[in-house]
Image (cartoon, coloured by chain):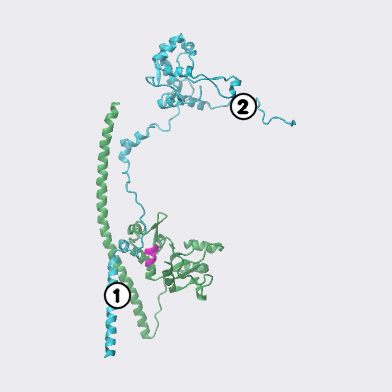
Chain colours: A cyan, B green
Amino acid sequence: MCLGGCIFAPTKIWRRWHKVVNVTQKRHAVVSAIAASAVPSLVLARGQRIKEVPELSLVVSDSAEAIEKTNVAIKTLKQIGAYPDAQKAKDNVAIRPGKSKMWNHRYVSRKGPLIVYGTEGAKLVKAFRNIPGVELAPGGHLGRFIVWTKSAFKKLDEVYGTFDKPSKKKKGYVLPRAKMVNADLARIINSDEVRSVVKPIKKEIKKAPLKKNPLKNLNVMLKLNPYAKAARRMALLAEARRVKAKQEKLDKKRKQITK
Amino acid sequence: MEKGGVIVPESVLKKQKRSEEWALVKKQEIESAKKKKTEQRKLIYNKAKQYSKEYEQQETELIQLKREARLKGGFYVNPEPKLLFLIRIRGINAMHPQTKKILQLLRLRQIFNGVFLKVNKATLNMLHRVEPYVTYGYPNLKSVKELIYKRGYGKVNKQRIALTDNSIIEQVLGKHGIICMEDLVHEIMTVGPHFKEANNFIWPFQLKAPLGGLKKKRNHYVEGGDAGNREDYINELIRRMN
């Protein structure tokens, strides 16, 4: 039987699709991403194939910007060792699991190197566009493998400023200060400055000794009261003397009676 | 990384030097500690000897005075005792809040807990309020000694630490001239100038339930029960509870 009513929580188009993010936060994010792209462990963790790349802040001379043809672009990628990454992207085109297929997200592929170029309107945009996976400067995991052209690299300084100078391009934006300036903990601990002031390692950790009853255990008693031995000795002697004296007294008395 | 190659051996050298220095300092410390310890032992020995003489003297003096007085046909009244030992007899349920507070102040938070107490007007009035919950009396030297030696724990750094070594006592009470067990016993027994600190150092005694039992908790000692002042007979109870 058909029950009346409506769907629970119908999806509405006035859902808040666009979220506001503070400008400074956005800038921090980009800056951190760029920094992460220079750390090999982060880039590897993200899954980029960078084994053949000579160095990680991969900067290429500006002549790359003049590349017009795609096959030249591929050749340069091969030469700088960035090709395996691009190849991975080409090979991994797959059909997306799940219902998104129906909503036009049919194919998924991996992301290859990110080419960042300096001057605007460089021809390389068109050349590199067709290589699958190669992309020109998106969100997601830190540590994208980035190929820089020289002028792009230089521009970084201008665009984002350094720790001391505020950026020229973005008003009043200073790079986020790192929490630890020297993040290599092991090195710091082992450094001379720290070691010379640090106290020696306490190797002997004192364990609380089991409490023994000094009234029963003579050695423990002596530890606490060194006079105890003498006192006890004297007490024993005195006792012996007393016993003897009493005996003698009794003997004397008794002898008389027997007499 | 050539610089790395140079730095590592240098830091190893520095570490060596530092370890040597530390070892030297440690050795010196151990030596001086040893010397100090032997001196202390002698001191403690002499003190203990002196105290035991003192106690004997007190006893014989008392007996002498009594005999003298009897001779003359008078009486020698014992000086009023300065030291009390309290034992909490009753549990924690259903108590008037003010007596509960007084027992807390006396550090008697558990049944069969015992503490020493100085006698003065203030403490006597407190005792009066909590009489049905405690039994108390005048401990003798043997009681004090046995309690402190067998069940003595000290309050070190707010922790209950066993008195296994004189150094523990010295650490806390050294500044009052109490450096060993005998000193502690003497201070308590004769209610010396630092009785308060010495007594507070001693954690409340956790005694065992008396062998042979109590007569009747609910009544006062005078009525054939257990509570309240039982003067010298506290010693007999202590023997059974220690």
Which image quadrant for residue A176? top left
Question: CA gap, disc 2 to disc 1?
Answer: 100 Å
Which image quadrant for residue B241? bottom left
Give the residue displayed 66% in from the left and 26% down from the top.
A12
Observer able to see residue B105: yes
Quick one: SS at disc 1? helix
Q: Which residue is mark 2?
A: A16
The stretch in magenta equals B145-151
Q: Residue A69's x, y, as percent?
A: 46, 8
Q: Residue A15's x, y, as percent?
A: 63, 27
Q: Where residue A135 is drawn, which disc sits there?
A: none
Residue furthest to the front in view is A1
Q: Residue A119's x, y, as percent?
A: 45, 13
- Seen in the picture, residue B136 relative to A19 is either above or below; the reply is below
Give the residue displayed 33% in from the left and 76% down from the top.
B60
Magenta highlight: main SS: helix
Disc 2 residue type?
Arg
The magenta stretch spans residue A220: no
Q: Where residue A239 is drawn, which disc sits there?
A: 1
Quick one: SS at disc 2? loop
